[in-house]
Image (spheres, helix red, strand yellow):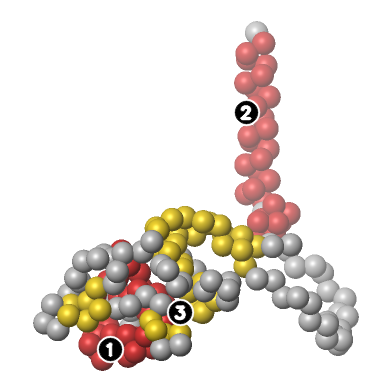
Amino acid sequence: MATESLTRCYRFARVDFEPDLRLLVWPDKSETALTLHESRLLEALCYFAGEVISHKSLSDKTFLPQDSMSHIQKIDLASIFNSLRRKLTVNGVMAIPIEVLPHFGFRVPLPKETCRHIHRFKQPETLPSPQPAITTIKTRRPHSSATEHIVKHSLMHKLSVLLLAAAGIAIVIVSNL
């Protein structure tokens, strides 16, 4: 059974970037996972592909206000850039070249295609053998939900059901007159 997901995709010559799944998908169908911030950074660059995006704008789009440690954005942005570059570099060539324009910002080339497609998740070839479980059998009542408990034991619930039933019968009787 294959698992599938409809996802956005920025398709470049050497790699596909799927920001919804935080994945780089290579032509041989191998995948490289990105961290949340690496994915946000690359997504902002791809969204503004072909345009120069300033360090401040890129930082604002990579770090959301609710992110912890957002006060050290400059340090984090540099480290995120470095780890992203390592993941994008194959055989000494960056699959998505990130151009640095000093005093202006950053830019990536336009993708070949921006699309939505169905991502098929890889399934393990074989299922792991189940570990023998040590089971302790305790004779207890099965766990019931809060709703079941109210339905079975609440006097107020029983009264409200009775009143609703009586109201329903009264409506049927009055409508037949």
Visible residue check, residue 57: no
Question: What's under tag 3, amino acid-wise?
Answer: Leu
Please name which of the two marks, 2 or 3, marks the residue nearer to the observer. Answer: 3
Q: Earlier in the sequence, mark 2 or mark 3?
A: 3
Mark 2 crowdedness (10 Å alpha carbons): few <14, some 14-19, many ≥20: few
Residue at 69% across / 71% down in the picture? 123
Q: Within the image, what quadrant is residue 34 found in?
A: bottom left
Q: Within the image, what quadrant is residue 165 found in?
A: top right
Q: Quadrant of the C terminus?
A: top right
Residue 151: x, y in percent?
A: 69, 52
Q: Which mark is residue 159?
A: none
Label 1, label 3: how far apart the Cα atoms are: 16 Å
Q: Secondary structure at mark 1?
A: helix
Q: Identify the residue position indicated by label 2 in the image.
A: 167
Residue at 68% across / 38% down in the picture? 162
Mark 3 crowdedness (10 Å alpha carbons): few <14, some 14-19, many ≥20: many
Question: What's under tag 1, amino acid-wise?
Answer: Ala
Q: Earlier in the sequence, mark 1 or mark 2?
A: 1
Question: What's under tag 2, amino acid-wise?
Answer: Ala
Residue 134: x, y in percent?
A: 86, 87
The number of discs equals: 3
From the viewer's perspective, tell me whether residue 59 is left or right of residue 176.
left
Q: Which mark is residue 34?
A: 3
Residue 29: x, y in percent?
A: 58, 72
